[in-house]
Amino acid sequence: MKRWVSVLLMAGVTIAFGQAWYIETVDSGGAALNDVGQYTSLAIDNQNYPHIAYYDVTNQLLKYATWNGAVWEIETVDSTEVPGMVGEYANLALSPANQRPQIGYYDAEEGHLKWARLNSAGDWEVGIPDGNPSNDVGRGCDIVIGADDYPHFSYYDATAYYLMYARSLGGTWNRDTVDTVGVPADFCSSILLDGSGVPHIAYYVMEGDTGYLKYAHLVSGNWVIDTVELRPSEDIGLYPDLVLAANGSPYISYFDRTNGYFKYARWANGQWNIDIIDNATNVGAWGKQVLGSTYVSYYDGTNMDVKYGYTSDYLSWHTESVDGPDNVGEYTSIALSKKGEINFPHISYYDATNGDLKYATKILKDVQPTVVVEPKGTVYKDTSYTPRVTIVNNGNAPVACDVRFEIKHGPSGLLRYSQTYAMPSLGVDQETELVYSTDWTVEDSLCWFYITVETLLPDDSVPNNDLLLDSVWSDTIHENAFEEIVLPVAYNLTVSGNSINLALPRAVSGELCVMDVTGSRRLTLAEGDLTQGTHTYTIDADLPNGIYFIRFVCPDRSMIRKTVLVR
């Protein structure tokens, strides 16, 4: 059953480290009516849309929510006629083959590991990877999908106290015992496949009064097992979350319950390197990570809020509160989406105060001036021009800002024109042309004028693309205005389709490249020392049809032109 939910059940914005979080309630009913949102698991598809699996506590069933670009679509994935606790330990993954969701979860009524996938008709198919009739199996499960679209699971046998592994063979299930786990009170594991399709598992073990973190991977059909961190009589290693680096090295984030720390371990130089992400009191439960612990979400048990952290060097961490002051942040999950060269996080989590499923994403603000439409090329003394420039919103939220347009006299450096345009709200990925209300009249000839366009956006996430530099040459009016005008060799960039002409007044060290509408570099046409004169280039690369920007940068010029490729 699918129900459609309005765009915003409840939304808000919080500010942390100069950047805002956009927060909304995905599924709600109030704690007195319905309690939803435990065991959240979040994934981002290739359109940057979030998908969330979670447990409905009141109705004891598994639910799924996805954003379709306008509203949240919410539906029940699995339930029983009489409520029977189906959906705890939900973990969601998107198929690399078709981006459709698959979910591993625990059926507490039957004591089974269950699995659901969304088929091409939009219906949920439910299976049982392990339905051991004698044992309680499926707690602490995790799922990963192979390149063949078949799922792999890690989970616990809570009767025999084993860590288990199961994989689909396309009609049957292969199950294997990985390790004994003592007698844990909490069940939590994390599984991934490396580039060769080999499973790797991080998991929690409890023996006597000592809880610790272990790691296993399959080598030639045998499980190779390693202890990551163990301290006698301490409880370490809960909520492990595993990420594999490009070279296959494991990164594991986890909770140190004894000391109340959020920690991570990295395998490097033949040993486990362990460090602390956050050492405030009682932080790190339900922690999750992406990109080798460089982005994390977790629960602050002291302040009862959800936190976010990131690092670029593993030497220092930036941590911040995402939502509060209610008791929010248990069962957190984090994923990244990419826009241009910027990664930005999405977090799902449980609001225990209100019994809600909540979702937060970092607001990315980035508006960029792309092309000076007028004046351009050559201008003429005693002639007036209406400045125009195109602006594009590269961010993930609508923004409004001022855009300043200035023109300076080249020989003297004196400012000859300055006007600021109050640009109204510009939608995501939208482009607009600003037409300034005051004209510029050229007062000099046979000289350069330098143009600067700057977007004045507070809290800009990508400030290094706020400036657009260009130049025009001022000439005298010819007696016959229709005669072909021979321009001097000047900084100039012209583009038509896949043909590019770059004029340089002198030898420079520069770079000419092709970017797509997200700001990502797609092709480098020239780089390094360039001679004086006119250079011609052709875009021969097999780029798909669409809008592209040609950018030239040297120490004293930056020019961008737009083109449309149609093959």
Image: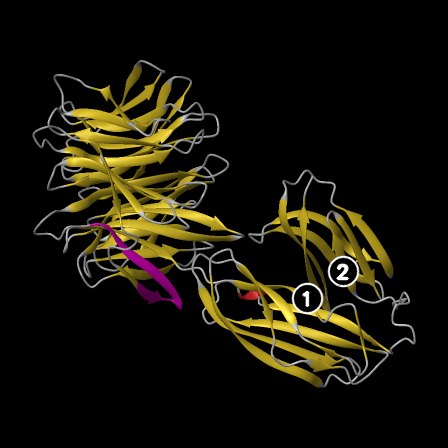
In three-dimensional space, the C-alpha distance between marks 2 and 1, rounded to whole angstroms, equals 12 Å
Q: Residue 246 in magenta?
A: no
How many discs mark residues in the rendered view? 2
Q: What type is the residue that disc 1 sits on?
A: Val
The residue drawn where x is 48% and y is 25% is: 196
Asked if one can make out residue 277 in the rendered structure from this viewpoint, the answer is yes
Image x and y of residue 58, in percent: 10, 42
Image x and y of residue 93, in percent: 35, 35
- Relative placement, left or right, of 402 versus 191 is right
Which of the two discs, 2 and 1, sits closer to the camera?
A: 1
* Residue bearing mark 1: 373
Colour scheme: secondary structure
Image x and y of residue 431, in percent: 55, 59
* Residue bearing mark 2: 493
Magenta residues, as a range? 13-27
Residue in front for this viewpoint, 439 or 193? 439
Q: What type is the residue that disc 2 sits on?
A: Leu
